Image: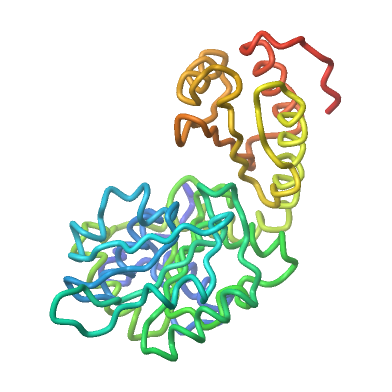
Amino acid sequence: MAEAEVGDDVYREDPTVNRLQERAAEIFKREDALFVPSGSMGNQVAIKVHTQMGEEVICEERAHIYSVEMASMAAISGCLARPIFATDGLLNWDLILPRIRGKSATRARTGLISLENTSNLAGGSVYPREITEAIVSGAHGVGLPVHLDGARIFNASVALGEPVEALAHGFDSVMFCFSKGLGAPVGSMLVGSRGFIEEARRVRKMLGGGMRQAGVLAAAARVALEETPPRLHLDHANARYLAEQLAEISGISIDPAKVTTNILVADVSGTGLTSYELSRRLAERRILANGITPENLRMVTHYDVDRAGCARAITVLRAVLNAPVQTVVA
């Protein structure tokens, strides 16, 4: 980062940012790409480009764009979310089709369908390619664009053993993060057609995302893009290990078989504590886990979490719950 060659990215003069964008477009086999400060900004830029005010955006009930992006699609794009609950957070065309609304004198029409792969708040679940391709085909058949919130698409790629360009095939736009499983400190990327990215660049500036000497960030993102994907399977193994250990603790409910990437969500309601209180007690002992509902606790493995750290987390959790302390084999 200290040695990055920089320029003014607003004027497209930062060579490190330019090379990163070119490489991202190449990996996803798209015409162009745009570096943005965050995944939320990338998603909201895409929504703004794809929709008109007063339209609806179909997404899963736990989708990041709906649950944890500050109602931005309403505030920025004037759009209403049309959330649909799906098992494990994974929509299919049969669930989506009945919710699509066309022209009407009284109801908002559908403007966009957005999928999330992997599904963050649904425990890192992964869309099989045949399901996303069916959704994209169906959506395009009725004239609707489809956006992919692929914040952790590289985790999905490793879990399925398929390249990211295959998992993103057909989507009108794709956002992915450098700062999640890939381990960079800052940044996300939008990829799409040249026309889409040109309009996205305008909206990024409108939202305050026009960065100047951003090459210092792009340099770290480039390392993450090239070097981290081959080791993501370690994060997945650590998450499965955590899930298997959690399943043995009285009061905690989780199915380890459903933990396929680096995120797990456990029901802790049987412990007598809310997830928020349990999170607070764990944080006091330097174990970080987020309560996402009163019942559900979310844990994530990543570049900075090794197997010994996972074992320590289980030991601390048992102590917090006053459960019998057992020797945890890493």
Q: How is the image coloured?
A: rainbow
Q: Residue at x 17, y 71 (%)?
A: 54
Vertical position of residue 81 compared to residue 287: above or below: below
Quarter of the image with the C terminus is: top right
Looking at the picture, how far across and down is residue 287, in whole percent? 58, 22
Q: Residue at x 76, y 27 (%)?
A: 308
Vertical position of residue 300 compared to residue 270: above or below: below
Residue in the foreground of this view, choosing between 85 and 77? 85
Looking at the picture, how far across and down is residue 235, in whole percent? 70, 45
Based on the displayed image, in which of its 4 quarters is residue 53 positioned?
A: bottom left
Residue in the foreground of this view, choosing between 239 and 31? 239
Looking at the picture, how far across and down is residue 240, in whole percent? 74, 42
142 with respect to 102 (left or right): right
Based on the displayed image, in which of its 4 quarters is residue 324 positioned?
A: top right
Q: Residue furthest left?
A: 105
Looking at the picture, how far across and down is residue 129, in whole percent? 64, 74
Counting every numbered tag in the picture gives 0
Residue in the foreground of this view, choosing between 229 and 273? 273
260 with respect to 268 (left or right): right
Residue in the foreground of this view, choosing between 205 and 13? 205
Q: Residue at x 51, y 86 (%)?
A: 137
Q: Residue at x 66, y 16 (%)?
A: 316
Vertical position of residue 266 compared to residue 175: above or below: above
Based on the displayed image, in which of its 4 quarters is residue 195 positioned?
A: bottom left
